[in-house]
Image: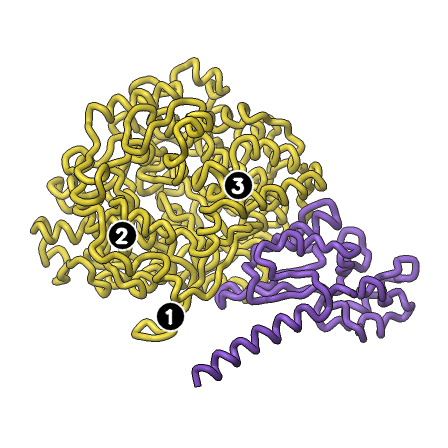
Amino acid sequence: MSKMLTVDHSKCTGCRLCEIVCSAKKTGSVNPYRARIAVIRWEQACVDMPMICQQCEAAPCMLVCPVKALSMDGELMRVVVDYDLCIGCRFCVAACPFGAMSMDPATRKMVKCDLCDGEPTCVKFCETKALQYEEMGTASARKMRATARKMLESMRAA
Amino acid sequence: MREQQIAYVDLSTGDIKNEPLPDNIRHMYLGGRGIDVYLLYNHVKPGIDPIGPENILTVSAGLLGGTLAPSSGRCHIGAKSPLTGLIGSSNMGGFFAPELRLAGLDHLVIKGKADYPVYLWIDNGDIEIRDASHLWGKDTIETPVMIRHDLNNEDVKVICIGVAGENLVRYANVLSGLKNAAGRTGMGCVMGSKNLKAVAVKGNHDLSIAYTEEALSYLEQLMKLIRNNAIMKELSQYGTPTFQKMMDLIGKLRNRNLQRNQLVNGQSLYAENLARFSAGMAACFGCPVHCRHRYQVPEGKDKGQWAEGPEWSTLGAVGSEVDCLRIEAVLASNYLLNKYGIDSLDFGSMVSWAIELYEKNLIDETTTDGLKLEWGNEELIYEMAHQVAHRQGLGDILADGPKRAIDRLGQNTAYYNIHVKGMSYLHSDDRMAPSHALGVATSSRGADHLRSRPGSDAHLLPQDTRDKLFGFHVPDMTAYEGSGKLVRWQELIYAISDALGVCKFQALFMSPSVIGYEEYARLVRHVTGMEMSAGELMKVGERICTLERMFNNRDGASRQDDMLPDRYFTEPTPAGPEGMKGKLIERDKYEQLLDEYYAAHGWDQEGVPIQETLVQLGLDQEPSHII
């Protein structure tokens, strides 16, 4: 079975620990703006949303890459960068609908979430489990059950 | 770790310069509140007017600010206080301090006074003084939105003042986000006096970590410690309002100013009732506890009311103190005070003082402009918030803070104002807890619990565990003996939390089983590479507390400023369970406690540090360079 990183926005408290630990793990320093994940906060609306690479099947970044430096790693179900091929043209930045592709300002290399090779650091530090790394299908099964419960409640109430 | 950087901004001349902080000074004071008092002692001449251009404002991140230390988002603001005339020192959470460090700066020293309203824009270390005329008169919720619009950048972090700061309300605060407030000692008033509406910052420099892998795994370990602590669990679920119930049940709340110490039918203010409106929890930078609660009122006359908060202290100030028990009204008052940028603790205490004066016929409707001052009248609270913020009517008097308001209303009103050093007492009634009362009274910034209050469950630990933890005999909460030492011990560690720029809610303030000296020492080592033992950290704490004391003494403070409000000595608590009811502070025993407390610090009987203490702490040459 393959795992995927899931995000439950409703559980996010906006603490940015995911950004902090991601940047520390990947760059050795703390710099949320070099992290592979970002929490977008609308302060006035009391909303926080973590944004991260979705590891798309038909990834637009892969499709537009002119030198085929991006590919799907079937084992970990993630999109990976081959730095021997990457020419740093940033087409992927333009194509990604989630803003998940970026060029690291310090190394000037394309960076994206690589799921920490199967042990995502952000997940380990997410106190409220807004981020989870779980078997494919688990998240949807959980959602089905939660919605089914709501439906059951409303049917009983009716 | 890079050198710490101080930016000096002179609003009168427009001069801006950056200077590194010498390494030895970092070792002596760490950062945050520590560096603040060092800068204030050297830059603020004694006797100056706090709202004149000679005062300075410091804005500081802590030594561990924005790093892999849990909850390292605290921002410290300092100046000479317009409320007390002594040290102004205020601390808030949020995201501003980490962003300041990411912009390459650790401390701001803001001098002089601008000719017209301005705000500072710090773009990755480059500082620009910008026109804020269009922001003057805007509230603390509109201001950051407008600044982000101006700068065309949604990620900018902002601290700002509201209308209260502009109108020089002596206890105006500085806000960041919906409710992170550097609330106490009137730092917003100082900003207002400098025509400084806000400071905005954005940065993307790296914050280097000395030992990244070790720091990461230690953070994981500390998060586990925090997660398994019962009080942290409560805070994660309810935030600080969780304390309301216990404090009410044991009779440790100010109610109707200080006439009662327990609520009548106060259940409506308990956290469980507030939780009905919960819209989830929010966190400050890097904090696993997420004690900030968001709420929304779905129906009734306050339908649509939303924001963050209130903290327990605000629940006390505009709830229990003024006897306003409708929770939605407390939410509305909290929202108003934050919007205007008024410290809720001073506001609640000043308003309940006024209501009691009215009740006792010490003031009448000529003073109140026809307003009837009554307990539990929520419309009155809203009206007073408007009046204080705009300095209208009675609000203009109350906006002056305890000392000046007493001067204006007559010395016969002084007895009823519950304050120390000119700053209002918080919402708790400490007549049965000598260590709590002593801590509030000796706090360098005026009546305040966040400088030394022993962990909320410290007194419930078994006696031997307790004695082992503190290293000396700590009796139960109602005893005098040992309180002086206990207060001093707690003062030092809170000074360290404030200097490291981490939240004391995860330190011994809340519970003895979370983060203490040993943990701080390890964090400092992993994050900065500096080797400091627990003992050395404790010495830094002593240095900070002693220099704050020196600042106050230089401006005329002495032993009499460490006295409790008279009422604490004369009126016993009228309610509460056995052991809490009928309690007051005995004056002669309190004097002995003061002696014990001064001696523990190495200060003489007037609270003046003795020469030996100064030499030992390396303070004998202060002020060292500027004045």
Between the residue at mark 2 and the residue at mark 1, the CA separation in whole angstroms equals 23 Å
Residue that label 3 marks: B501
Which sits earlier in the primary sequence, circle 2 or circle 1? 1
Look at 46% across and 25% down and name the residue there.
B468
Which sits earlier in the primary sequence, circle 1 or circle 3? 1
Secondary element under disc 3, as helix, strand or loop, is loop
Colour yellow belongs to chain:
B
**Which amino acid, mark 1?**
Val
Q: Is residue A140 visible?
A: yes
Q: What x and y, as percent, mark residue B267?
A: 28, 58
**Which amino acid, mark 3?**
Gly
Colour purple belongs to chain:
A
Which sits earlier in the primary sequence, circle 3 or circle 2? 2
Residue that label 2 marks: B348
Look at 76% across and 67% down and name the residue there.
A55
Q: Is residue A88 left or right of residue B415?
A: right
Between the residue at mark 1 and the residue at mark 3, the CA separation in whole angstroms equals 34 Å
